[in-house]
């Protein structure tokens, strides 16, 4: 995710850090060359009776804009849902820790173990969603006797949830937690199970592939043919207008594709690393374990991952 | 569902595996022939005073695009709801198994029976939604004494839910499950009843048929008349532009129709087989019953069913 | 609701069973006559200096399409909400019956009485929403001592809910149902109260009348003036294009109006009769009361009511 | 709200009762005069080199239609939410009364007092939302000892909620209501608190004022300039088309403004009086207190307030 | 937020208090100068063969309007969610105070302490969202022994939630609050945790920066080039139409940007100060602590902050 720079107004028009831009740069250059080619060949192909006019391209452009608007909404909805799930995760973790602290006032050690399991869940979920290896974070955070079974499982975040359930059941058996409180905390664990399931769903089910395919194809073909339609009206101004229109369509198509999978590490994806560190900071502060880990800093392009 | 191939950028423009494309291929060929016919006859029918111009088709095309955008949203919403229901099913099943394991620590046999009933529910729901025969999966998974009554019922998924309720009531009568936990697990069964009802609703109530009818008609008639409107402006370029515009409209109309019934076996429908196998893998792993069944592999066209 | 015929592709273009079509047939004939009139008078009124061009009608047509798209969304949302409420009703009824069966294992007679009250609620709600007389169904289904007070009440579905509450309170007083289960079942009754209230709301509050009024007016005036704007460009082709554009706008406006009140008996409304019979079948099967009533069959036009 | 007249089809085109129409009548007359002025001056201002063409107005008109579509959605969403809140209020009141009747079978007097407090809440909320004086209704409905403190409070609906809570706490202290039922009823009171809060939110937070301002300005300026753009193409037909296009935009803008504040007494606002009376009828019927008050009748323009 | 002035109709067209307007004033002046420049140079650059026509700008303008409509929806959804969260906060606070008053009838002092903690939470959340210093409000409202730990914490609103949980646990240990009521109140605290988390999410996760960037760029470039496209058709009228179209696009883009971050102090942001004072008034009235603090008054430009 890009952290908004201070210089806000003019600079934006000329800022080059948008990852989206670098992706479509090659396409825009192609379009520019096409436009120049169209301008040069204009005299020649008119004599051949080959004609393209703006009118059908207006119709097509507006139709594509409408469908692209739909695809943008769908992609953005996935992004927002993913962010909301991670927000709810933090809420559930805070509530669980508050409840544990309230119940086990005389056993801060067990509360700390519970707190580390909660933090480990965030990191493990992050690694699962990004298909990276979470062994290091598991080693760092998960205490025995849970560590071994978590490392042995192919579904580690889910196994951590089982461990949290075990910890809770053990506390109830010891009599440290009443039945009513057990139920209240179990329902927060259920909430975490919903979040895990929701993230897995977003991650494993993309927007139907045919949508991307159809829109990708039509947008690209549209931009390729556009200069030939514009040249009859615009002559030498064709490259300017053609690249401008192409930029609008290509960049939004490209952004929609990026937002569609919000758990990646592209510039506009969710900064899961930062979210996990923020979770660790908040939970440690509630557990009064100082000093807090530092927040990750955005890189030179204002990106967080 | 199509598993996204690695080759991502250029190949997409030329990939032919979209099931949507094969469906509309015939229509596009028709449109191509119409266009050629229009180009050939252009001289002739102009002398007859027959004229079609682009302007009214622009208006019509944009209007159809707007209505098609609405239909796409409605179809996609059904697809997303269906996927979310199946996601929630997995969450409810995991939570139920976690609760059962926590309560019956000394009776792994009963937990395994419960686990198989849960898995059978997924398979049975799949068969009900696709109107296929689930007897084999019932035979494989459902233990006696439940098997007989499930096979005898016309509404098997619902009957399996009754069986799960029975199992729960039996455990409570034995004293293995407390009243509070019984309530918590019963509310997860209620959740499964909601999922069953939701899937049945999506499956039995299509988008009002008149929508499909009206849009299908207008899109097809629009594409058929289009070449005759374009030919006055575009002459020899008519086939190219006409097929391109038709492709955009026909493919999105066709895709909307496919997504509208997300439980089918078309390329963009939900891969229910894969979801059921994934459920079986996850539940067996939680129950420590190794080895896990293998995930189904996408076919040569990257499809899962 | 129209049951989708087997012949799916070509036939649809020529199928005449859409109720929407029959409704707008008169309007389309008017439009056809207007178009022919425009073509005939074209020579004459041009000499009078009266001119209408396509451009302002394009603007107007697109604007109307956008507003019509909004109205379609609003109407369709009401249809979907209505269908979801009826789906939730079936879910609540099934859950209540499952809970009753689990609790009263030794008293199948009382369970059957409860089951009939549940079925009566569906039928009574249907009659209330369609403003038909439900006395026959009440007589058939509601057992004494409830029958008299239900027949005496002006709000029968609500009164049936009171009776279900009474039945539940009686069972608790007898000690057949524990307090916890009573609460769980009472929350399902609350769910039924929500469904009743939701259906009443949809039925009593249409989309603000001015929306229908404004769109109805503009769509009709637009279609009436359209031939006169098209004739300058299209000459003899005016009737074809004008009727085509009018069909698109009129049919969607007409469908939106039909979906807006989903509890009617028009072709695209909810098949409440079929839903009630399906409910009766499902509940009777759960109660093992065979034979099940037959599902209603769609009529010659594939309609269910 | 306008009660839909029986004469449904043709009459609608000519019905004049839309309050929206009367509001924009003045504007439409202005537009008509502008159009006539444009037609008359056309010869003159062309010689001055002043030209306006349709093309930029098409672009602007479509853009405004898109933004107006968004504003319509936002306003309508507020209307629907407001209606849903009032629907939920009735549901909560019915459930509370059913629960009270079930619990206090031997104390119909207290149930009646509770019932009147519930009715008073509806009326008081109505008066608060419309900023009218509710003293008369409070005097009529609220029994002592609650009446004095309600009349003394600046936030009467909220105070009535406190009184309902007091009544409940008193019944529990007397032992008439068990702890579990108390909780169930308290959660229905919470639901009423949510409804009160939701209505206050809708009433106190309009759609950001700048939206209304910008759209109001652009729509009016657009309609004012429109005749001058159309006159070059349409000559004498300018007034007809200009007034028609203006009617479409102005009426929808005006309606959106009306729906934005659904608690007013305009023709398309919610009929809060009728809703309160309906509530009183339903609750009295459940309490068997006959005769029921009559439903308010729509006025000569089919309006309910 | 702007408080709607009494003068409603005509004045709006000429009112200058929209903060949005002042922001885009500079841009509009630029556009005006560009237009005049285009008019002056028109003769000259036509001879150079440089031509821009309206057609491609129509296509582009409509496409941008569609994407801008999407961005407006996304921004407005954030505004509405933020407002709903603050509305729910007030509801939860009122419910908690009602429950506390009902439970601790003989200990008004403790109820008052609880009431001040609730009020402090609102103020602290406001300061956190606006990144201002809340020490003064903490000093004024939070009683000892909570004040010290709140002031020491970097996450003060969250810490206040912990304190509210402590207060509740203390009351239960004293026996003043039963287990069931404790649970009901704890679930309202959970609701406050959700609100805190939701506000933090909105505040920390803007709409993906690339959306703002792309739309900002295209809107500005579009408005800059527009005069040169219009001048061929409109000659001397170019400045009028160009500034008008630019105003529509720039103002909506600017407003979307303002609404995107609803917790700021711009004219269209949420009036958090007023909301906090309203909360204080309502809670104090429920606690019968008179006189109530005065509501903040809108400033000369009808703004509340």
Image (cartoon, coloured by chain):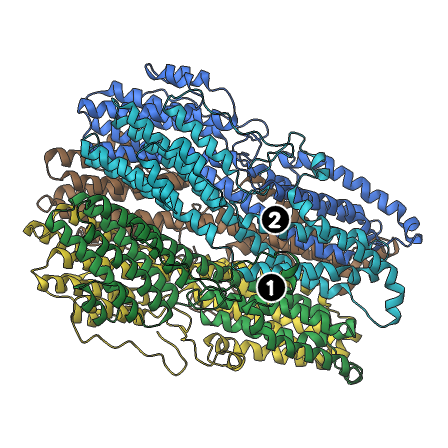
Chain colours: A cyan, B green, C yellow, D brown, E blue
User: Is residue A244 or residue C157 the one in the foreground?
Assistant: A244
Instruction: Please say if E274 is above or below D27.
Output: above
The residue drawn where x is 36% and y is 24% is A287
Instruction: Please say if C92 is above or below D171.
Output: below
User: Is residue C148 or residue B18 the one in the foreground?
Assistant: B18
Q: Position of residue C227 (x, y in %)?
A: 67, 74
Q: Quadrant of the N terminus of chain E?
A: top right
Q: Are marks 2 and 1 in contact (CB under 8 Å)?
A: no
Q: Residues within 10 Å of mark 1 (few under 14, many from 20)?
A: many
Q: Position of residue C116 (x, y in %)?
A: 17, 65
Q: Is residue A244 visible?
A: yes
2 vs 1, front mark: 2
Horizontally, residue B92 falls left or right of residue C166, namely right
User: Is residue C107 or residue B64 the one in the foreground?
Assistant: C107
Which quadrant of the figure has residue E233?
bottom right
Q: Position of residue A301 (x, y in %)?
A: 65, 35
The residue drawn where x is 17% and y is 51% is D289
Which quadrant of the figure has residue A283?
top left
Q: Position of residue B208 (x, y in %)?
A: 44, 69
Q: Residues within 10 Å of mark 2 (few under 14, many from 20)?
A: many
Chain for mark 1?
A: B
CA separation, marks 2 and 1? 22 Å
Confirm whether circles 2 and 1 share one chain: no
Read off the residue under disc 1. B65
Read off the residue under disc 2. A255
């Amino acid at each position: 995710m890009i952290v908004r720079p201070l210089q806000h107004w003019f600079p934006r028009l000329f800022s080059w850090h948008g990852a989206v831009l670098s992706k479509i740069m090659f396409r825009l250059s192609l379009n520019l060359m096409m436009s120049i080619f169209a301008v040069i060949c204009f005299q020649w192909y008119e004599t051949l009776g080959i004609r393209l006019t703006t009118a059908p391209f207006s119709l097509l452009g507006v139709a594509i804009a409408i469908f692209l608007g739909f695809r943008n909404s769908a992609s953005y909805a996935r992004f927002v849902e993913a962010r909301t799930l991670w927000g709810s995760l933090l809420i559930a973790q805070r509530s669980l820790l508050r409840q544990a602290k309230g119940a086990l006032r005389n056993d801060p050690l067990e509360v700390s173990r519970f707190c580390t399991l909660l933090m480990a869940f965030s990191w493990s979920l992050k690694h699962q969603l990004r298909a990276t290896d979470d062994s290091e974070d598991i080693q760092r955070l998960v205490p025995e006797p849970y560590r071994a079974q978590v490392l042995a499982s192919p579904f580690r975040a889910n196994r951590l949830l089982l461990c949290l359930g075990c910890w809770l059941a053990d506390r109830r058996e010891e009599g440290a937690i009443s039945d009513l409180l057990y139920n209240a905390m179990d329902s927060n664990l259920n909430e975490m199970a919903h979040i895990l399931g929701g993230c897995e769903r977003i991650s494993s089910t993309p927007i139907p592939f045919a949508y991307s395919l159809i829109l990708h194809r039509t947008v690209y073909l549209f931009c390729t043919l556009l200069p030939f339609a514009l040249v009859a009206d615009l002559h030498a101004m064709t490259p300017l207008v053609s690249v401008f229109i192409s930029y609008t369509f290509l960049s939004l198509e490209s952004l929609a594709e990026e937002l569609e999978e919000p758990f990646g590490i592209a510039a506009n994806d969710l900064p899961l690393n930062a979210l996990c560190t923020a979770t660790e900071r908040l939970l440690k502060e509630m557990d009064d374990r100082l000093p807090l880990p530092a927040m990750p800093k955005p890189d030179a392009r204002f990106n967080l991952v």
